[in-house]
Amino acid sequence: MTWAFWLTTLIVVATPGTGAVYTISAGLSRGMRAGLVAALGCTVGVIPHMVAAITGLAALLNASATAFAALKWAGVAYLLYLAVQTWRDHSDLIGTEATPQSAGQVIRTAVLINLLNPKLTIFFFAFLPQFVPVADPLPTVTMVTLSLAFMLATFMVFAVYGAFAAGVRDHVLQRPRVVQWLRRSFAATYVVLAGRLAIQEH
């Protein structure tokens, strides 16, 4: 696994999207246990995207230069879209509900959030296959390994989000500017990654 894979994975996972927002919300509103359970649920929600990508791996790896270019520019466009959306996002991270929920309810909600997350679909179909060498004798095994690494990174990062949110819940509520600064930093990183992807060759 290259540094480019880990960098892309960490940026995709760490950007405060719907799954991260839900995990942070769970930690802030219901404490440490809810935050960690939400992280687990979001990780489980990655599995359908992984399965779908692996079943179409051969076609992607053997695609023509035109198909590769189409995927690449779709990825560039989506990264720029995420940058704009992240920059403009002013939603409330905490929400208004602090009603106790069972672990099953938290996991079910988290799974649905990540299952319906278009960012993951684009990542697995347009980005992940690019980290599988064209001459790889076992592309499916490599794809599974990369996917499991992505899931591990998802759980670890989201668990940190949930635990940190639970630990600083009394302070974060009064510091909305910190959240705004983080979102703008992630938006800028998306632009940098879009530029890198744009100059990448097959």
Image (cartoon, helix red, strand yellow):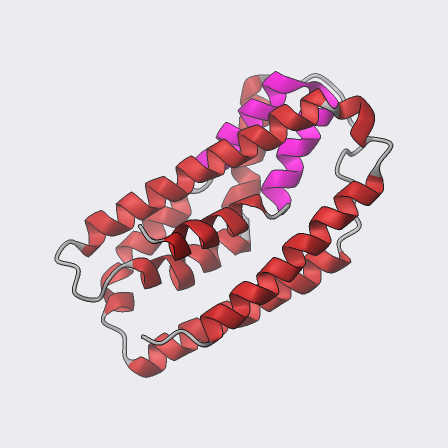
Q: Residue furthest left?
A: 137
Q: Residue furthest bottom?
A: 66
Picture quadrant where residue 5 is located: bottom left
Q: Position of residue 85 (x, y in %)?
A: 69, 60
Q: Nearer the viewer, residue 133 or 25?
A: 133
Q: Position of residue 95 (x, y in %)?
A: 78, 34
x 49%, y 47%: residue? 10
Q: Position of residue 135 (x, y in %)?
A: 16, 65
Q: Is residue 75 above or below residue 180?
A: below
Q: Is residue 15 above or below residue 70?
A: above
Q: Position of residue 196 (x, y in %)?
A: 48, 69
Q: Nearer the viewer, residue 195 or 34?
A: 195
Q: Is residue 35 magenta?
A: yes
Q: Residue furthest right?
A: 174
x 48%, y 75%: residue? 198
Relative to 145, is 122 on the left or the right?
Answer: right
What's the magenta bit mostly, secondary-structure-wise?
helix
Where are the magenta residues, as a range? 17-44
